Every structure is written in structure tokens, then in C-alpha cells.
Image (cartoon, rainbow, N blue to C red):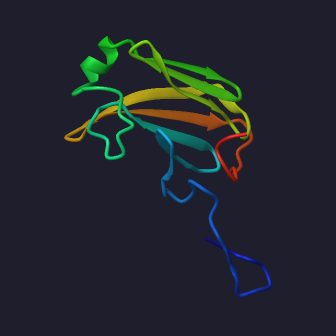
Amino acid sequence: MNQIPGTNEVQASADGANGVAKAEKGYSWTQTEDELEIVIELSSSSKDGDGVGPIMNAKDAKAAGLKVKYFPKKTTVQFQGKELLSLEYFASVDTDGCTWTLDSTSKGVSLVITCEKADGVTWPRITA
């Protein structure tokens, strides 16, 4: 949180800022001024039921045809032949600075997408 100059009031943090994940339907996200991180649960053990199937490890996820496409103001994710996410961003990202990894835990597998922001500022929200 930031102190509002000249007052004792504190400005609330932007969504997804300060390492606090903001939950959305089908994914969660965090941000810094320079980066955006999106996490999508790929296993059926996700607590809200948004998982997409019995994926138990990263090898299974890769074998199921995971596809991530980056555009300056949009990212799309396809998995097992269906679109999991089509996300239009609030502002542009640097597509050369976007990557994805798979995170395996005892709860299942998550897709972690990291993108560098083009403008280097905190966004008030993730979507346009």
C-alpha cells in the first residue's frame, strides 16, 4: 500500500500487486511494474473445479498438446484440443519477454505464464 502524499491515508494496492494473487474465473494473476504472471490449474484437483482433466505431471501435460500463443495485447492457451484461456490485456506486453513453465506439486500441475510489460507500470486490472 502507498501513502497518499500530504495525508495520513493509505492508497489500496492495485489488483494482483505486492505478490498477492488476484483470483479470476479459471486463473489467478499477480503483477509487478515490469511483469505479469498468470497461473492456470491444469489438473482436476483444483479446489474450484476449473481443472481440465486428470493431468498428474508435467510430462502428461506436454503430451496432451499444451499450446500458448502470445500477442502484444492478448494471450491464448489451448489444452487437450480446447481453448482454456483467451485473455485480452489492459495494456501491451513484450511478446519476446513472454514464457511459460509447468509447475508440478502434490495438488497437480499448473501452467505459469510470465510476460514482460511493455510500459513498465502497475495495471489497475489485467483485462481491457
Q: Is residue 101 above or below residue 107?
A: above
Q: Residue furthest bottom?
A: 8
Residue 116: quarter of image: top right
Of the pair 25 and 15, the residue shown nearer to us: 25
Residue 49: quarter of image: top left
**Residue at x 54%, y 60% (from the top left corner):** 18
Of the pair 102 and 88, the residue shown nearer to us: 88
Q: Is residue 95 above or below residue 124?
A: above
Residue 104: quarter of image: top left
Q: Residue furthest right?
A: 6
Residue 41 at x, y percent in the picture: 37, 36
Residue 23 at x, y percent in the picture: 49, 50
Q: Quadrant of the N terminus?
A: bottom right
Of the pair 96 and 60, the residue shown nearer to us: 60
Q: Quadrant of the C terminus?
A: top right
**Residue at x 74%, y 38% (from the top left corner):** 91
Task: Report the side of 22 relative to 34 (left or right).
Answer: left
